[in-house]
Image (cartoon, rainbow, N blue to C red):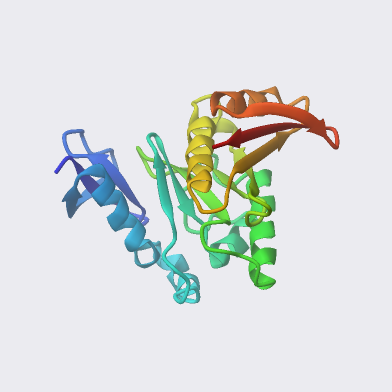
Amino acid sequence: MTHVVIVNQQEQYAVWPRRAETPSGWLATDWTGDERACLERVAEGWTDLRPASVRAAVAEDAARPAVQLLTAGPVQLREVLPSEAEQLREGATAGLDWLGGAPGDGTRVAAKMLTRAADAGLLQPGWGMYVLVRSEDAVAVGGMGFHGSPDGGRVEIGFDLVEEARGHGYATLALSELACWALAQDGVETVIATTDPENTASQRVMERASFTRMPDADGLFVYQLTH
């Protein structure tokens, strides 16, 4: 048993090494095991373990399969429910502790896209939006997600980190993890990410995540990752 699930006063959960000192404001629960087992336990019970302020909204999504949780070392990617996206698109926290106090503009735009897809019946489990949460303290640092479900074997990913979280490698790790998950799904051969020519930080993220620069399209830099 190498890891333990910990909880804070906001009923946010994270996975923590048992030998490491529990961070201030957090308590260890009775859930222990290896890292994967603990992550799976949090993922399985995520809708029941959310802060009380959003449990009622989450209950509306009870018929939907359990949200997906992916881990990329220092960050975890937690799938966003439509009820949470409705809050995020308005700049609310959806019951999470956000670095800087609130989600960024890109995260709010992604949340708006998710709610529109859900309202239109186009949202497929796994192919929506994710919140990036720091493993060390369960603080949300950004959003990442797909621009729709796979089409013709291709899917596009976008990402947004709050200003204070940039420069730590979170986006690179999360982009690589989500892209690898996408390529492991049936029928998906290519993952695309685009950025403005002046956004050199995003370009470095894609390069570090092993994406390859492709011909520009509509004035954007296009990057691609394939099997």
Rendered view: 213 above or below 138: above
- The quadrant of the rendering that contains the C terminus is top right
Residue 178 placement, left or right of 69: right
Rendered view: 211 above or below 139: above
Estimate the x, y position of residue 40 in percent, counting from the top left: 30, 54
Residue 88 placement, left or right of 6: right
Q: Which of these two is toward me, 51 or 159?
A: 159
Rendered view: 26 above or below 114: above
Q: Quadrant of residue 105?
A: top right
Taking the spot 31% from the left edge, 50% from the top edge, the residue there is 39
Residue 175 placement, left or right of 74: right
Q: Do we see residue 6 in this rendering? A: no
Q: Which of these two is toward me, 59 or 92?
A: 59
Estimate the x, y position of residue 217 in percent, counting from the top left: 82, 35
Q: Quadrant of residue 114?
A: bottom right
Estimate the x, y position of residue 174 in percent, counting from the top left: 50, 38
Q: Which of these two is toward me, 225 or 137?
A: 225
Q: Quadrant of residue 87?
A: bottom right
Estimate the x, y position of residue 91 in percent, counting from the top left: 63, 54
Q: Which of these two is toward me, 198 or 121?
A: 121
- The quadrant of the rendering that contains the N terminus is top left
Taking the spot 66% from the left edge, 52% from the top edge, the residue there is 110
